Image: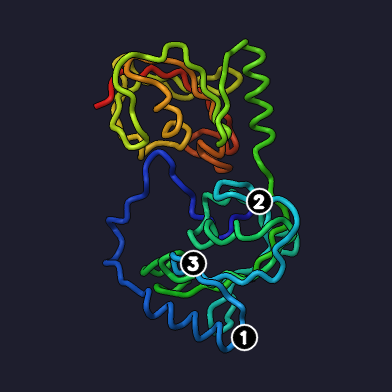
C-alpha cells in the first residue's frame, strides 16, 4: 500500500522528540486571517472549533461515525488557499488508522459519518507546524475536500480476544474502549491513576502465545502517560501487589502500522504485576 504523506506514524510508547527542529514560529493569527478570507471568498458555510480547525459539512452521511482511533477509508483532495493541489487520492480512497494522521484530520473526520463529505480547513499547528515538510512550506494552511467512504471498527480484534478468553477459560472484563482485563490479584497497596509513575513486571505476547517482549522480575519504571493506551487504562485497575492480564486491541496498542517487529493490527496480551506506585 502506498502511504500518503499525511500519515505521521504515532509512536505510542514514546512521543517523538522535536529537539532537532528549527525554533517554532506561531502562525496562528496569520493562518486564522487566511482561512477567514478563503471562507468569505468562496461563500463557505464553515464552523470553527476551539482548536482553530474550520470544517464544512456538505453531507453528514448516514452510516457509522468514526472515533479518533478508527480504521477508515477516505477519498480526498488537498490544496492550499491559492487552490494549488498538494495531494489527491484515487476515487477508491486511502485506508488508514486515524490515530496516525495530522491533528486536523484526527479532530475533523469524526464530524462526518460514512457517506459524508465536506471540507477541512486546517491551520499549520494542526498540520505540519512551522517547519517545511516534504514540500509543504512551513506555516501552510491546508484545505482538504474529503469523502468518508467507510469506517472499519476493530471487530476482528474483538473476535480474536473473545476466542482467546474462551480457549483459555479466562474471567475477563471488557471496558467501553475495547480493552479486556483479568484480575488474578487485585493488590492491597496504592492504586495508580493514568498519570502515575509505576514499576511493573510484565510479559507481552500474541494470541498464539509467541512472546514479543518481557521485562525482568524487578520490573520497569515509567509514567503511564508515556505508554500505549491499553496500559494507561489497564494498569490503574490494579493496586500495588496486584497481578493479572491486559488483552489489548490494536486501537489501544500500535494501531494499523508495523512497529518494531509488531505487525500492524496486532492484539497484544500482557501478564502484568504492579510492583509499586512511585
Q: Nearer the viewer, residue 9 or 233?
A: 233
Residue 168, percent from left and from top? 62, 11
Q: Secondary structure at mark 2?
A: strand
Q: Which residue is mark 1?
A: 43
Question: Residue 6's image quarter?
Answer: bottom right
Which residue is rendered at x = 37% and y = 74% of the image?
28
Q: Which residue is mark 3?
A: 49
Which residue is rendered at x = 49% and y = 82% of the image?
36
Q: Earlier in the sequence, mark 2 or mark 3?
A: 3
Q: Residue furthest bottom?
A: 41
**Marks 2 and 1, how far apart in space?**
30 Å
Query: Is the C-beta separation of discs 1 and 3 under 8 Å?
Result: no
**Marks 1 and 3, how far apart in space?**
19 Å
Which residue is rendered at x = 56% and y = 22% of the image?
173
Residue 200, percent from left and from top? 34, 22
Q: Earlier in the sequence, mark 1 or mark 3?
A: 1
Residue 246, percent from left and from top? 50, 24
Split into 4 quadrants, where in the image is the C terminus? top left
Q: Nearer the viewer, residue 231 or 191?
A: 191
Residue 66, percent from left and from top? 63, 51
Q: Secondary structure at mark 1?
A: loop
Q: Nearer the viewer, residue 234 or 129?
A: 234
162 is higher (above) or lower (below) than 253: above
Q: Secondary structure at mark 3?
A: loop
**Marks 2 and 3, how far apart in space?**
22 Å
Circle 2 or circle 3, nearest the eye: 3
Q: Earlier in the sequence, mark 2 or mark 1?
A: 1
Q: Which residue is mark 2?
A: 72
Question: Residue 223's image quarter?
Answer: top left
Circle 2 or circle 1, nearest the eye: 1
Amino acid at each position: 500500500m502506498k502511504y500518503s504523506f499525511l500519515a505521521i506514524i504515532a509512536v505510542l510508547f514514546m512521543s517523538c522528540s522535536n529537539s532537532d527542529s528549527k525554533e517554532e514560529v506561531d502562525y496562528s493569527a496569520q493562518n486564522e486571517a487566511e482561512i477567514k478570507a478563503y471562507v468569505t471568498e468562496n461563500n463557505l458555510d464553515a464552523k470553527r472549533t476551539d482548536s482553530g480547525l474550520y470544517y464544512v459539512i456538505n453531507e453528514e452521511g448516514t452510516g457509522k461515525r468514526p472515533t479518533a482511533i478508527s480504521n477508515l477509508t477516505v477519498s480526498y483532495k488537498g490544496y492550499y488557499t491559492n487552490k494549488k493541489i498538494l495531494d489527491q487520492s484515487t476515487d477508491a480512497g486511502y485506508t488508514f488508522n486515524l490515530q496516525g494522521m495530522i491533528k486536523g484530520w484526527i479532530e475533523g473526520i469524526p464530524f462526518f459519518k460514512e457517506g459524508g463529505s465536506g471540507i477541512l480547513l486546517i491551520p499549520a499547528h494542526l498540520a505540519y507546524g512551522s517547519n517545511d515538510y516534504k514540500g509543504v512550506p512551513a506555516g501552510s494552511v491546508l484545505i482538504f475536500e474529503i469523502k468518508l467512504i467507510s469506517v472499519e471498527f476493530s471487530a476482528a480484534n474483538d473476535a480474536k480476544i473473545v476466542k482467546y478468553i474462551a480457549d483459555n477459560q479466562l474471567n475477563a472484563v471488557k471496558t467501553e474502549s475495547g480493552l479486556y482485563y483479568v484480575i488474578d490479584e487485585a493488590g492491597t497497596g496504592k492504586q495508580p491513576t493514568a498519570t502515575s509513575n509505576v514499576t511493573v513486571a510484565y510479559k507481552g505476547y500474541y494470541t498464539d502465545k509467541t512472546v514479543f517482549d518481557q521485562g525482568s522480575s524487578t520490573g520497569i519504571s515509567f509514567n503511564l502517560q508515556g505508554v500505549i493506551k491499553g496500559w494507561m487504562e489497564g494498569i490503574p485497575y490494579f493496586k500495588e501487589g496486584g497481578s493479572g492480564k491486559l488483552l489489548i486491541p490494536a486501537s489501544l496498542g500500535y494501531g494499523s502500522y508495523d512497529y518494531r517487529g509488531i505487525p500492524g493490527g496486532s492484539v497484544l496480551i500482557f501478564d502484568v504485576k504492579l510492583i509499586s506506585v512511585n
